[in-house]
Amino acid sequence: MSDVLIIGGGIVGISAAARLAPHAKVTLLEGEDSFAYHASGRSAALYEPHYGLPPVVALSLASGDFFRAMPNLLTPRGLMIVAGQDNRAQFDHDCDDMNLAPMDMDAARAMVPILNPETVTYAGYGAHAWDIDTDLLISDFAKTARAHGAQIVAKAGVTALRRMGGRWLADTAQGQYSGAVLVNAAGPWADDVAQMAGVLPKGITPLRRSMARIPAPVGMDVSHWPMVFGAGEAWYMKPDAGALIVSPAEEHPMPPHDAFADDMVLAEGLARYEAMVTAPVTRLLASWAGLRTFAPDRVPVIGADAGEQSFFWAAGLGGYGFQTADAASRLLADVVLGRAPDFEGGLIQALSPARFG
């Protein structure tokens, strides 16, 4: 029997286990064979603390000291926004929103030589973006959790949940597990877990995002190029292991499942990318997709359920799970353990499940 039962082994669940295990007996249940299999294993892996709505930005900024203190976790990347002549308003909005400075187009093409001078009119840049070694972060959190006695169980998809004798009972293929409190870190399946537990869902919606890995342009070293967004996040490109990842940055509602790329959506996104560069896409090295989950207001849901105080939400992190992992897990641990959170009250209220009534 555990004090805390966590459902979900992505970055949210693993980081929660690491923060809770020193203070409570923790069991984490993951349905897949391995951890960080779904959205966490298909992340763009960028720490850009100004990316997202204000509550997300607050969590990302609050995670910065932890990330910078971990050796080899962050590698400089930088972020660029580009736009055409007819998209100035969106470009200005994006630069202001993400704290980017407009730059001379010659300087932009010196940084990313394939930018098309006939279609790219505006560029903005910020150095405050870093690649995250997501495998290192996941393994560090898992190592910490296990070092403090956490039980982490794979192939343990939850098939039934019920509250009995003041405890949560979870039936899985690996047997039955119990905990005094339950943390719902199930990502795309968060509302399904809530319904299984008899808790009111919050409208957590999985949105598919497709990606393709393409060869680097012939003769070019892309390793030091920044990540590049089309204005309005119409597409993005990021160097990755000597190649490029390109995404149409779509957000298509999907039922929770093992996602895969939509060929037509991917082709449309690659066409938007190709319109802004001089290097055509001739072949794909690989393609995949992930599900980014959002609450209706696109703000994470972290805290105790208003109707069931032993049921804690850690859901709706969208595409921000890694870059908010430190602060989000600290806040969750504080509320689960009944400690005064080390965050200002407005942020706690903004993230609280109680905002949904």
Image (cartoon, rainbow, N blue to C red):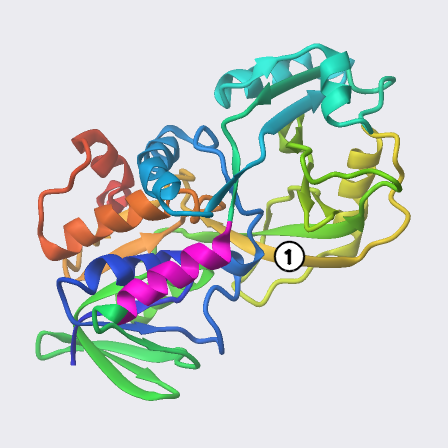
The one of 36 and 140 positioned closer to us in this rendering: 140
Q: Looking at the picture, which amino acid does disc 1 mark?
A: Ala
Above/below status of 169 relative to 79 = below
Q: Quadrant of the N terminus?
A: bottom left
Q: Is residue 13 visible?
A: no
Based on the displayed image, in which of its 4 quarters is residue 224 positioned? top right
The residue positioned 70% from the left and 42% from the top of the image is 248
Q: Quadrant of the C terminus?
A: top left
Give the side of residue 357 with respect to residue 244, left or right: left
Give the side of residue 345 with respect to residue 267, left or right: left
Based on the displayed image, in which of its 4 quarters is residue 15 positioned? bottom left
| Segment colored magenta | 133-146
Q: Where residue 274 appears, x then y in whole percent? A: 84, 35
- Per the image, the residue denoted by label 1 is 289
Q: Is residue 228 visible?
A: yes
Based on the displayed image, in which of its 4 quarters is residue 22 positioned? bottom left
Q: Where residue 286 appears, x then y in whole percent? A: 76, 59
Above/below status of 246 relative to 259 = above
How crowded pointer 1 is (Cα within 10 Å; few <14, some 14-19, many 20+) is rated as many
Above/below status of 82 relative to 235 = above
* Secondary structure mostly taken by the magenta-highlighted segment of the chain: helix
Q: Where residue 152 appears, x then y in whole percent? A: 33, 75
The one of 47 and 65 positioned closer to us in this rendering: 65
Above/below status of 199 relative to 241 = below
The residue positioned 35% from the left and 32% from the top of the image is 61
Give yes or no for residue 284 being in the magenta stretch. no
Q: Where residue 9 appears, x then y in whole percent? A: 40, 66
Give yes or no for residue 139 being in the magenta stretch. yes
